[in-house]
């Protein structure tokens, strides 16, 4: 049983560009959350998707958007990249009503 | 505004001894707490959790204690093993919706 998978593992983008990160949840999980982990910090909640809708959102600007597909996989899009968006982006999945999340290995985004 | 705090960035312990990792929180609405362990180049993995209606939860070598009046929780690892060397994150969930607030992490080194 594959766990949570994220692609790509590493990415380098130029300031002002747009980026799309992808996540496939663990089998049987229908809820996907995205987190940003800056260097030396803990993960920060960006948003959560359930039934293809954004269910909850953290304190992130509208440049951060997402999508969930019928097969529960998800994308995170970031527009107008800033240097400060450089971070590890983590995807986490959980079953509806589940009390813990399973995390992917993350996508390391570097904005230059 | 950091609602979950881990004030010790690092901790070193001799193999076989007890490791105690601490976490403080400010939001009394948090009702579920978790500890995640993270190795380099991997996503966080779930370790142990506790509901706000309990004050202790044990799983093998790992025990989590919750003191609601002090808004404090701790993770005890006994006995500590070199494989326990990792970064440990404390996380809190305000509504068991898998929207986690993470601390900044404590890097544990277990010395053989």
Image (cartoon, coloured by chain):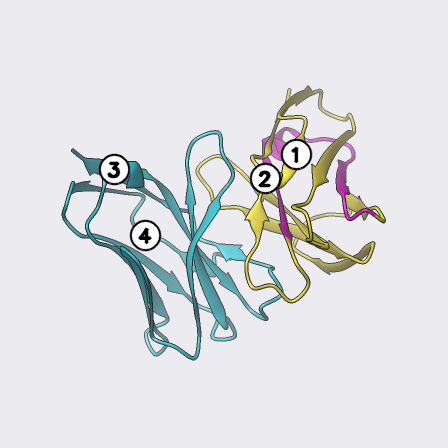
Chain colours: A yellow, B cyan
Work out whether residue B76 or residue A17 is closer to the camera in this orientation and state it: B76
Percent across and percent down for residue A108 are 59, 28
Q: Which mark is residue B7?
A: 4
Q: Which residue is mark 3?
A: B109
Q: Which residue is mark 1?
A: A6
Neighbor class of circle 1 (other Cα within 10 Å; few <14, some 14-19, many 20+) is many
Could you say whether the residue bearing mark 2 is in a helix, strand or loop? loop
Give the residue drawn at x 38%, y 77%.
B54
Give the residue drawn at x 68%, y 47%.
A27
Q: Which residue is mark 2?
A: A104
Q: Please give the range of residues in magenta.
A: A71-93
Percent across and percent down for residue A73 are 76, 43
Q: Do the residues at discs 1 and 3 belong to one chain?
A: no
**Left or right of residue A6, residue B24 in this image:** left
The N terminus of chain A sits in image quarter: top right
The C terminus of chain A sits in image quarter: top right
Taking the magenta stretch, the answer to whether it contains residue B89 is no
- CA distance separating discs 3 and 2: 24 Å
- Chain letter behind tag 1: A
Percent across and percent down for residue A29 are 68, 53
Q: Do the residues at discs 4 and 1 belong to one chain?
A: no
């Amino acid at each position: 049983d594959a766990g949570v998978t994220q692609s790509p593992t590493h990415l380098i983008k130029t300031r002002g560009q747009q980026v799309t990160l992808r996540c496939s949840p663990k089998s049987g999980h229908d809820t996907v959350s995205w987190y940003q982990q800056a260097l030396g910090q803990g993960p920060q909640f960006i948003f959560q998707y359930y039934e293809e809708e954004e269910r909850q959102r953290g304190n992130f600007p509208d440049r951060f958007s997402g999508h969930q597909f019928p097969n529960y996989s998800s994308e995170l899009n970031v527009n107008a990249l800033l240097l400060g968006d450089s971070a590890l982006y983590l995807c986490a999945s959980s079953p509806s009503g589940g009390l813990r999340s399973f995390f992917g290995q993350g996508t390391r985004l570097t904005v230059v | 505004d950091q609602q979950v705090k881990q004030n010790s960035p690092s901790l070193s312990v001799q193999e076989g001894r007890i490791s105690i990792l601490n976490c403080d929180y400010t939001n009394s609405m948090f009702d579920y707490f978790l500890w995640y362990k993270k190795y380099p180049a991997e996503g966080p993995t779930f370790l142990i959790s506790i509901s706000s209606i309990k004050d202790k939860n044990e799983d093998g070598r790992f025990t989590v204690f919750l003191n609601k009046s002090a808004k404090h929780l701790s993770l005890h690892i006994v006995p500590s093993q070199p494989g326990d060397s990792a970064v440990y994150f404390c996380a809190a969930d305000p509504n068991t919706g898998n929207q986690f607030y993470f601390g900044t992490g404590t890097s544990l080194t277990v010395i053989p």
